[in-house]
Amino acid sequence: MLKIFSISPKSTVDCHLFGNFSTKINCLAGLVFLVAILSGCNDMFEPKVATICKDNPALCEDLNPDQWCRSEKADIIRHRYRHPDELNEEQHYRKLLIFETYQRCITKASGITHKKYRDIEGGRMKGVVTARKELDRLSRLSKDSSHPLLAYYHWSRFSDVNARKRFLDAANRGELRTPELLIALASIQVKRDLSAAKQSLHKALSMYEDDDNMDTSVFQSLATIALEEGKFGLVYIWSRVGQEYEAGINDNQLSSIANKYQLPVSLLDDVADEVTAALSDGAFNADSLGLTKL
């Protein structure tokens, strides 16, 4: 864990005092480290969830009071704490997703009966009602939004054709600039244009700086597209990459694919390893890796 430093005017890095090159390099490194520390201050100094609830009970009292769905409930409380004022459109979208996750958990938990502690069941039902009301409210407020995330949300959840049009209009204007949005676009394209969907997924992967928060469902999607195109080598490669991220098929299924289509396994394993390394380094490029030629 990073130590929290007390920063005073005396501790400010003053680079102009130093003349030699190596000292300037050290000074620059110190500045970079200082910026990194300061950029994470909000999270470092944020109180624990229990403290937030004690000091701001209104942020917590409409959720289930027991230990079920603890992490999902904490996400809601932190989001409420961090954004006390009117939400921007991306924050609105994140809140929708957070409440969806909480609703799935608390709805399941509400079906568990307690012979001894009936009040627990009542507390969970309170959480179910809150989730339903919040999702209805947030969905109603964002129904006509042109923000790509919210437009896609309303298309994917409610089959809102007007929202779909707004999302595709944003795509045509070049406004889909994140992996998340490009993956969403591919989910629409795949029904009519496999090549366009594949390009969107390739571009999404190229935008990740590393593989820490990568949406690993992309690998299965690319394997499925390759199967539809009859490119069985790519089916094997993307399935193999998926295995590295625990999002692929098992070894027996992979061997079955290789045997059925008489694939050069050793060669394809090398390509899969190169793809995995590129993803880890944030340097994925489908053309450079030769994937567009397979």
Image (cartoon, grey):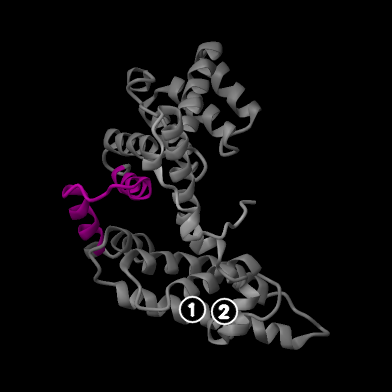
Whole-percent x, y for residue 63 in the image:
59, 80
Find the magenta span and give its range: 163-189
Relative placement, left or right, of 47 versus 195 is right
Q: How far is disc 1 from disc 2 in space, using C-alphas? A: 6 Å
Whole-percent x, y for residue 204 in the image:
36, 40
Residue named by callout 2: 128
- Count how many numbered circles sit on residues in the image: 2
Snapshot quadrant of residue 16: top left
- Front residue of 74/244: it is 74
Residue named by callout 1: 132
- Front residue of 166/214: it is 214
Whole-percent x, y for residue 71 in the image:
62, 65
Relative placement, left or right, of 206 versus 9 is left
Q: Residue at x 83, y 85 (%)?
A: 116
- Front residue of 228/108: it is 108
58 to 152, vertically: above or below? below
Specify the amino acid type for callout 1.
Answer: Arg
Q: Residue at x 31, y 77 (%)?
A: 141
Quarter of the image that includes the C terminus: top left
Magenta-span inclusion, residue 272? no
- Confirm or deny contact between disc 1 and disc 2 (CB under 8 A): yes
Q: Secondary structure at mark 1?
A: helix
Q: Secondary structure at mark 2?
A: helix
- Front residue of 218/232: it is 218
Whole-percent x, y for residue 226 in the image:
40, 29
